[in-house]
Image (spheres, rainbow, N blue to C red):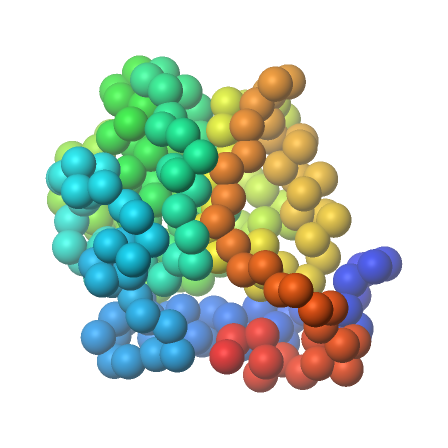
Amino acid sequence: MTTAAGSPNVDLSSLRCAIQEEYDVVAREPDKGFHFHPGRPLTERLGYEDTWLEGVPESSIAAFAGTGNPFSMGALVAGERVVDIGSGGGIDSLVAAGMVGPEGQVVGVDMTPAMLERARAAAVEAGRTNVEFREGYGESLPVPDGWADVVISNGVLNLIPDKAAALAEIRRVLKPGGRLQIGDILVQKAVPDGAKEKIELWTC
């Protein structure tokens, strides 16, 4: 078992593989049908404004599998630097790139190669040169200390077993006074430890 203090007793490598397999399918076959509702209908349900999505390729929108709307807490500001944790097919990173403009920068971080491939292709199609996508994990972001004005994330923190490590990384990459804008899953009852140890429940 590869676990950290305070995190569930689950093998980290096996969990990451299971999550990668799930989102590899989303990246390659977004219309297949899942337990969640991906794509443009989901953006509408979560309150994404049409103007935000202008210039974002349909290939990126189709693979959207977020759980919330990090931009509902406020639009980003021109010139800001943004890190998107779990950037998936790139939709939130591309929306952010549009908001911060050519003087701003966006780094999307994801651990699933097929999602990174889709996001990078979408950025090229959109002509967004102020965004790049890096392979990495929420617990060890490939971003320098104090680089970001804003960290966004959408439906990803719930998939990271060591949330304390992920939050510490967010603090590390944020500038003093920086902002965290996330959309994620909240539960009203604590998840039993036994359930946390079942990898199949993390992706259902």
Front residue of 26/177: it is 177
Query: Could you tell me residue 105's position as x and y percent?
Result: 37, 26
Asked whether the viewer can see residue 78, the reply is yes
Left or right, 73 with reference to 160: left
For the question of whether residue 10 can be seen, the reply is no
Question: Which of the 4 image quadrants contains residue 21?
Answer: bottom left
Please state if 160 lies on the left or on the right of 73 as rendered: right
Residue 91 x %, y %: 29, 48
Work out whether residue 123 or residue 192 is closer to the camera in this orientation and state it: 192
Against 145, is 196 above or below? Answer: below
Residue pictured at 30% horizontal, 48% vertical: 47
Residue at 42 percent of width and 52 percent of height: 68
Q: Is residue 155 left or right of residue 33?
A: right
Residue 202 position (above or below residue 200): above
Of residue 79 and residue 48, the one placed in the foreground of this image is: 48
Residue at image coords 67%, 43%: 167
